Amino acid sequence: EVQLVESGGGLVQPGRSLRLSCTASGFTFGDYAMSWVRQAPGKGLEWVGFIRSKAYGGTTEYAASVKGRFTISRDDSKSIAYLQMNSLKTEDTAVYYCTRVRYYDSSGYYFHYWGQGTLVTVSS
Amino acid sequence: EIVLTQSPGTLSLSPGERATLSCRASQSVSSSYLAWYQQKPGQAPRLLIYGASSRATGIPDRFSGSGSGTDFTLTISRLEPEDFAVYYCQQYETFGQGTKVEIK
């Protein structure tokens, strides 16, 4: 059974940093791209970014709203994906979901499995 | 960047009724790249449909997806109590704003 468990959320002041972890089990983690999607309180879903598998270079892509502040990385030996969030803003307050990405082909993709999410609150 | 517009914003129906949800893209997209998700309060989203019309594992056959080009539809043939939720469409990094299906 595929399981994704996020951790590391909490209350943080604006301008500070936080690192989220996504611990995966039930599949060969290194074979898959992983993505983070967030949801502000009472709002819809917003893609944050993803990291490709090592077979596809392990490269990353980010939403414009977080580019330059957030970094996604992975440790395939531990089956963990990370979201390093720096220079946090109040508008980054959201539940952050870890997802396993599945590609249709070389470009299109969807979010096949989701973790339960971890809440990040940015407030002074 | 593609914009996905879902309608209606809220759909008020009774159990047993048919629900028809729309997702319109701002430009023509490959029909293979459209997915639908269901989200219940306090829960993570769940994949329902991918490739516009393929049901994910374990999804009941009362859920069906259709469409191509810029217009896509999620149909729930007969609403069950557990189907009242918010539904999102997605293509690449873009999500629609969601349609809430509520009990009338």
Image (spheres, coloured by chain):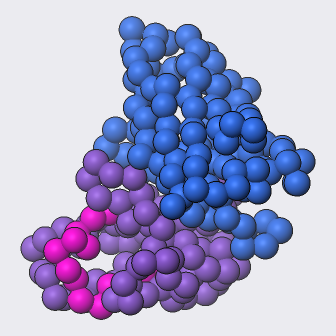
B83 magenta-colored: yes
State the image coordinates of residue A1 (x, y, percent, origin top left): 51, 61
Residue B104: which quarter of the image? bottom left
Residue displayed at 49% across by 25% down: A8
Left or right position of B100 against B16: right
Where residue A4 appears, as percent x and y from the top left, is 52, 48
Query: Start and end of the magenta stretch?
Result: B72-86
Point out residue B7 in the picture as x, y percentages from the top left corner: 38, 72
Say if residue B49 shows up in the picture. Answer: no
Quadrant containing the C terminus of chain A in the rendered view? top left
Q: Is residue B65 shown to the viewer in this render? A: yes
Identify which residue, A95 or B57, lies in the foreground.
Answer: B57
For residue A119, above or below residue B3: above
Give the quadrant of residue B102: bottom left
Q: Position of residue A96 (x, y in %)?
A: 48, 38
Tell me the purple chain: B
The residue located at (57%, 40%) in the rendering is A23
* Residue name at image x 69 percent, y 37 percent: A78
Quarter of the image where one finds residue A41: top left
